[in-house]
């Protein structure tokens, strides 16, 4: 009786698969944007939430293709992505501010206000189609593992610089800039893990840091909205301060772990 042949484990080949895998992910995100846009009339809350998350992920992963694309090409694509994302900014900001006010215990100070105007998705669907065409012209398949890894390291260095600036001067604009770079780095690290594994701890720290930076920014937006409506009382201000101090504590702790 012949022995059974050995079971061959699937070997990762990041050098060969990196570019094609990135191209598939980018194109898949564009396709899902179209699905989200079509879903908005029947399910606006969830569809907009998914759509904005996908646009951020798309922009973050597009940065990994810098080695094979011209800056003008990427800028053109990013402009279309921003147009789609920003079309729903009023709706999303309103929901975030109300939810943040509830968590901060200052909901009673904030009236519902008028609802956001409905968004015409027809031109945005056309923009998504144009985005798909633009993406198809990028030679992302030609990227090697080293190209993508080196670009991610460059972006990680930029994220570190944003963190150091925010650590030394935790003004709202510096924390927000740190948040955007940290969120982008998170998406990039997750993609690299899909190719070659590892980075589990760094991904976890990056995700948590981006979360608390986002919570801090939402509290900042809430304060601005209360000021705008002339209903920021001393009590509401103290509650927001308390929550921001707690978030800043988490941000500092996680930042030191991520960037020792």
Image (spheres, rainbow, N blue to C red):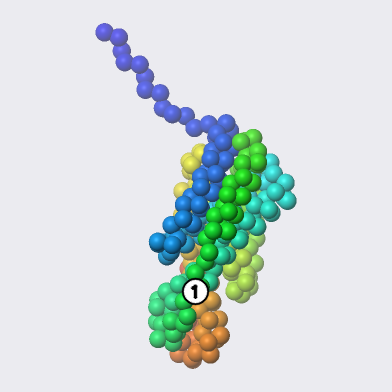
Question: From what the image shows, is residue 52 above or below residue 134?
Answer: below
Residue at the outermost left position: 1
Residue 68 placement: quadrant: top right
Disc 1 crowd, CA 10 A, few/some/many (<14, 14-19, 20+): some
**Residue placed at 68% from the left, 53% from the top?**
76
**Residue placed at 61% from the left, 41% from the top?**
136
**Residue placed at 65% from the left, 67% from the top?**
165
Image coordinates for residue 214, horizontal then vertical, percent: 51, 67
* Numbered marks: total: 1
Image coordinates for residue 2, horizontal then vertical, percent: 30, 9
Question: From what the image shows, is residue 110 above or below residue 125?
Answer: below
Image coordinates for residue 145, horizontal then vertical, percent: 60, 37
Foreground pick, 70 / 192: 70
Regarding residue 218, the answer to whether it shows in the image is: no
- The C terminus is located in which quarter? bottom right
Under tag 1, what secondary structure? loop
Residue at the outermost top position: 1
Regarding residue 161, the answer to whether it shows in the image is: yes
- The N terminus is located in which quarter? top left
Foreground pick, 1 / 84: 84
> Which residue does the numbered mark 1 point to in the structure image?
116
Image coordinates for residue 250, horizontal then vertical, percent: 48, 68
Name the side, left or right, on which 156 lies relative to 25. right
**Residue placed at 43% from the left, 57% from the top?**
39
């Amino acid at each position: 009786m012949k022995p059974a042949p050995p079971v061959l484990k699937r070997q990762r080949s990041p050098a060969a698969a990196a570019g094609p895998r990135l191209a598939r992910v980018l194109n898949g995100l564009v396709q899902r944007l179209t699905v989200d846009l079509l879903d908005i009339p029947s399910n606006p809350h969830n569809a907009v939430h998914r759509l904005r998350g996908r646009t951020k992920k798309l922009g973050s992963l597009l940065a990994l293709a810098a080695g094979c694309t011209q800056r003008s090409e990427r800028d053109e694509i990013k402009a279309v992505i921003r147009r789609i994302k920003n079309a729903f900014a009023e709706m999303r900001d309103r929901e975030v501010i109300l939810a943040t006010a509830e968590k901060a215990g200052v909901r009673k100070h904030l009236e519902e206000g008028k609802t956001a105007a409905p968004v015409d998705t027809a031109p945005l669907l056309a923009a998504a189609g144009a985005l798909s065409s633009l993406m198809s012209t990028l030679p992302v398949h030609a990227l090697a593992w080293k190209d993508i890894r080196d670009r991610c390291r460059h972006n990680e260095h930029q994220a570190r610089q944003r963190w150091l600036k925010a650590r030394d001067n935790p003004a709202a604009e510096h924390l927000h800039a740190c948040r955007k770079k940290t969120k982008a780095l998170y998406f990039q690290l997750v993609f690299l893990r899909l190719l070659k594994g590892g980075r589990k701890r760094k991904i976890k720290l990056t995700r948590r840091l981006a979360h608390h930076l986002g919570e801090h920014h939402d509290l900042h937006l809430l304060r601005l909205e209360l000021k705008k409506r002339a209903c920021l009382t001393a009590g509401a201000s103290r509650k927001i301060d308390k929550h921001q101090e707690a978030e800043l504590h988490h941000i500092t702790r996680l930042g030191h772990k991520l960037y020792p």
